[in-house]
Image: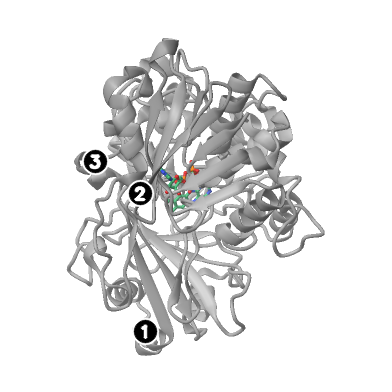
Amino acid sequence: MKAHIVGGGFGGLAAAAYLIRNAQVPGEDITIYEADARMGGGFFLGGSSESGYNLPGSVFDAEFRCTFYLLDVVPSASNPGVSIKEEFFTFNKNHPFDDRARLIDRNGRIVHGPRFGLSWGDGFHLARLALTPEAKLDGRRIEEFFTPHFFASEFWLCYSTIMGSLPQHSAMELRRYLNRTLHMFPYISDMANIWRTPFDQYDTFIVPLVAWLRERGVNLVNGAFVQDVGFDPSRGGITVNRLDYERDGAAISVAVAPDDFVLLTFGSQAADMSTGSMSQAPVPQSAGRSWALWKRLAQSRPSFGNPDAFFGAAHVSDSRWVTFTVTTRGKEFLDLMSALTDSETGSGGLVSLIDSAWMLSLSIFHQPEIIDQPDGTYVWWGYGLFPERTGNFVPKPMNECTGAEILEEVLRQLRFDEQFDAIMASSICIPCDMPYANNIWLKRTSTDRPPPVPEGSTNLGLVGQYVEVSRDVAFTIEYSARTAWEAIRTLLKRGPAPPPVYQAQFDPKALFNALKLFLCPSTTRPPVR
Ligand SMILES: Cc1cc2nc3c(=O)[nH]c(=O)nc-3n(C[C@H](O)[C@H](O)[C@H](O)COP(=O)(O)OP(=O)(O)OC[C@H]3O[C@@H](n4cnc5c(N)ncnc54)[C@H](O)[C@@H]3O)c2cc1C
């Protein structure tokens, strides 16, 4: 029995690890085909300290159950004496966020008030949505459930800039988020129980996981774009008998036996990502490779879902993020931010500039952020939730800006005018356009994402954020890991079932703390979980 996995993001890598750990499939019988030159998908690390790094931000909590089950047996890259899980938990216990300036307005004032600005009506609407059965939320938008007061509240500004939600997004996904993250509500401003990776996500998760798979003989094939899979017509249901991929200009076809397994990653939040430089804006891409296979298969099979709900030009204005990573040899910016936010470098979480047209959020990492980051180099990160709007100081949409223009907008927003020249001279800002980064939030129906094993399938499973599993939230590696585990267990009928999704609404402590937030708004925050 051979296993073929298409996509080497966290979901595909996790699938290989579950096959080994839970289903006792030998590593040498597993092949991962990845279109990109590196494994990792949305967890990437581009550039260098000289040219400027490019990486995504970092939001986790302690309840990534499928993920940490796996990462408990994989040694960390920075300290092979401990597992990735142990490294991650120890780091977060020792370095909890203590964000004292989560939101800053146009006058440089920190915005923070009792109950995070929520009215009793807002609280009622939140509870109503959380309690509405998902079946009644097909195709519905968040804005249908709230008043304008809610969208102007501190709570919504904190929540939406951490999670990515917009008023026009999916009410179904927000319902899942509310129930999954209720335990975070009292900490939505200081971020004290929101976790992060000790180093960037590629170094923390992908490098050691790839090494672990390699040691076990897994075949990792990069630069292999899988264009099609063939189905055996004599078997009636869905039985894959062929996999076609293109590599280095050559077309290669692999025969798949009926007792082999194929796991396909459908889509990527990092699809069509493009980077720029200090002097060049990212050049838009429209290759569409990461959802091409999904689109091809869904055309003739309705049970494969609806990729058009997430991908294609139609919804990009509701899903685009522009991120930027700043690599600097000077400490001016970090020192100014420490003074502004009353936090040591790396102890604050996100800082959102709520009056900026792009809705800029900044994250000053604990240093070093990258394992081999040279001494005297510092890295920080940011993103714009509304990148297609015109900037306040730079009169352009963010996705059309060079790194220098984005950095200029940030510095002008912060009124760091005196140190402007010094910061510009010592910094490299790499802009990164991600037209689909936020598409998991798009309004959807319950059939837009196919199940981990489509009906009638004998040897095909589906993995990733565009595959439907109940209750979990999709902007997480946990979601992709869960789909992989579900698909493997359903197809192979081996190993334990995935642990249940953490549901904070059934956790008495989380409920109590959330109620206290409303009933005793002046109380200090409860101890961190
Ligand atoms: C800016 C940003 C920040 C994020 N921060 C966090 C965070 O802090 N915490 C968190 O949990 N999650 C975060 N995420 C989400 C995280 O990146 C995803 O959950 C995760 O990457 C999903 O893994 P995946 O394997 O399903 O998909 P991906 O990582 O997107 O990987 C899919 C891979 O499949 C490949 N592929 C697709 N089709 C084919 C084909 N036909 N042939 C060959 N290869 C193919 C693609 O090239 C890609 O590498 C973030 C995402 C973004 C964009």
Residue, x 38% and y 71% (percent of image)? 430
Amino acid carrying mark 3 in the image: Gly
Q: Nearer the viewer, residue 219 or 446?
A: 219
The residue at label 2 has a CB less than 8 Å from ligand 1: yes
Q: Nearer the viewer, residue 317 or 105?
A: 317
The residue that mark 1 highlights is 424
Q: Is residue 475 left or right of residue 194?
A: left
Mark 2 or mark 3, earlier in chain: 2
Q: Which mark is residue 271?
A: 2
Amino acid carrying mark 1 in the image: Met
Q: Is residue 284 left or right of residue 51?
A: left
Q: Is residue 94 left or right of residue 445?
A: right
Quarter of the picture holding the C terminus: top right
Look at the image and tell me whether residue 285 can be seen: yes
Residue, x 47% and y 62% (percent of image)? 55
Residue, x 60% and y 61% (percent of image)? 203
Question: For the view shown, which residue lies furthest in the left direction?
Answer: 395
- Label 1: few (<14), some (14–19) or many (≥20) C-alpha neighbours in 10 Å: some
Judge depth for marks 1 and 2 and give the one in front.
2
- Label 2: few (<14), some (14–19) or many (≥20) C-alpha neighbours in 10 Å: many
Judge depth for marks 3 and 1 and give the one in front.
3
- Distance in Å between CA atoms under marks 2 and 3: 10 Å
